[in-house]
Image (tube, rainbow, N blue to C red):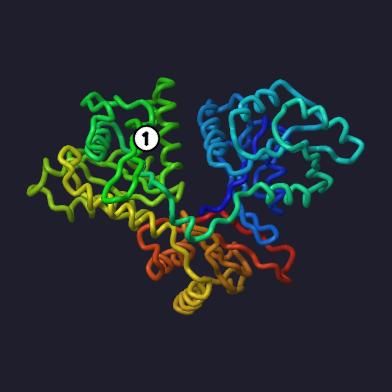
Amino acid sequence: MAIPRVVIVGRPNVGKSSLFNWLDGRRLAIVDDMAGVTRDRLVTLIEHDGRFFELIDTGGIGIEDADNLTKEVEQQIAAGIDEADVILFVVDTKTGLTPLDEEVAERLRKVEKPILLLANKTDHAGLDNGALEFHRLGRGWLIPVSVLQNRNRQLLFEEILDRLPEKQSEQAETDAPRMKLTIVGRRNVGKSTFVNTLAQAQRMIVSEVPGTTRDSVDVHFDLDGHRFVAIDTPGLRRKKSIRTDIDFYGLHRAQRSIRRADVALLFFDCMETISKVDKQLAHYIEQQFKPCIFVVNKWDKVAGQVATERWVRYLREHFPTMSYCPIAFVTGQTGKNMKALLNHAQMLFKQSQTRVPTSTINKLIQAATQRQQPPLYLNRRPKIYFGSQISTTPPTVIMMCNMPQGFPPSYQRYLINVCRDNLPFGEVPIKLYLQKRESQEPADQPAPSEQPIE
């Protein structure tokens, strides 16, 4: 199973970013009194008592962004809530209960996930009674905390760990009842026709009018004893062309469908050139670490005229960071090559669920660092002490080292490629975390970056 995610939410200026830094033990998020500093979600890997989880900071709910990015900030918050396993709802004891706190609570009322209500800035026990008014929100187990006074940090960790999903056995992980295929692409590339052919029924409205599908729709079907869910999504267009709420929420739902996916099928029309929308979709799939197949549709229209090798080179040139993604050529109208496509999608799904022994990873790391040493950093040679796979879907590898900041992105890509070439993850994204091992390092070393590199 994937690493559990703990997401921090709340109105602006309650100390969400300070809490993020406090739990991580490093200053990663920008902390400022001005509302709206945090826009994108920030992610860091946390280890406590042998358990790992990703901590995610989000923007303030209810703020009107000064740069007219309110919808984009809101989209990031919604994505964080959607993918959370535990939610930390932060309020401010010194300010007291506000209408915006109640608005956040109302939004979380429909969320059926564990929620901890953190009354931040409760600097001493004398303020605990004041924090009790937040019980009126009716959401979450109330914990008074103080980032400034380092109050109740251990208690908060214990409560978070108690609410994380239980670890599943490897057998349970591989027994998912249905594999979810999300089908994405720009407008009029034949996604709904493809789904209809899969389901052998007119479950979707098929039309030559771009934008017919305005919501994401699940279609269940069976093939050779295997159960699938095909998620058809709205056709997307460039962000600057998104002018209506229907377009905006269509984009939001398509992105949510990508997050739900076990495997994403990114569709291209063989009669059209690659567009900016195609690149935006590919980038989002890559950001979410989803296994992906590039699907060139309507191939019957150019069969015998255009060689597959030409399209393969074309895709590789435009998506160099996703060179691991397989490429399929299909005809959605007739179903040609669709069974082979589904079989390949199953292979990717199995790859993403595979676990590799720690001893295998350590031997591979040792050989890789001997073959190509990391560059010097501050006149010192960064070292990797050991590595281990800590999660699946996506395969996630953590490497304990002396100076995580000393490994440049190019060397991290080298390590990922070594893993991809030598482990059973050849066609799926791999998450890599470099984490500093506790040791007698000089106290003035810069803080390491733990953002995963794909």
* Amino acid residing under circle 1: Asp
Is residue 314 placed above or below 280 in the rendered structure? below
Q: Nearer the viewer, residue 262 or 76?
A: 262
Residue 419: image quadrant is: bottom left
Residue at horizontal 18%, vertical 56%?
309
Q: Position of residue 35 (x, y in %)?
A: 67, 31
Dividing the picture into quadrants, the one containing residue 217 is top left
Residue most toward the right?
A: 126
Q: Looking at the image, which is closer to me, 379 or 209?
A: 209
* Total numbered circles: 1
Displayed quadrant of residue 233: top left
Q: Is residue 342 left or right of residue 59?
A: left
Query: Pointer 1: what residue?
Result: 218
Percent across and percent down for residue 255 are 43, 37
**Residue at far front of view:** 225
Residue 410 shown left or right of residue 219 in the figure: right
Is residue 237 visible in the rendered structure shown here?
Answer: no
Mark 1 surroundings: few (<14), some (14-19) or many (≥20) residues within 10 A? some
- Vertical placement of residue 348 versus 382, above or below: above
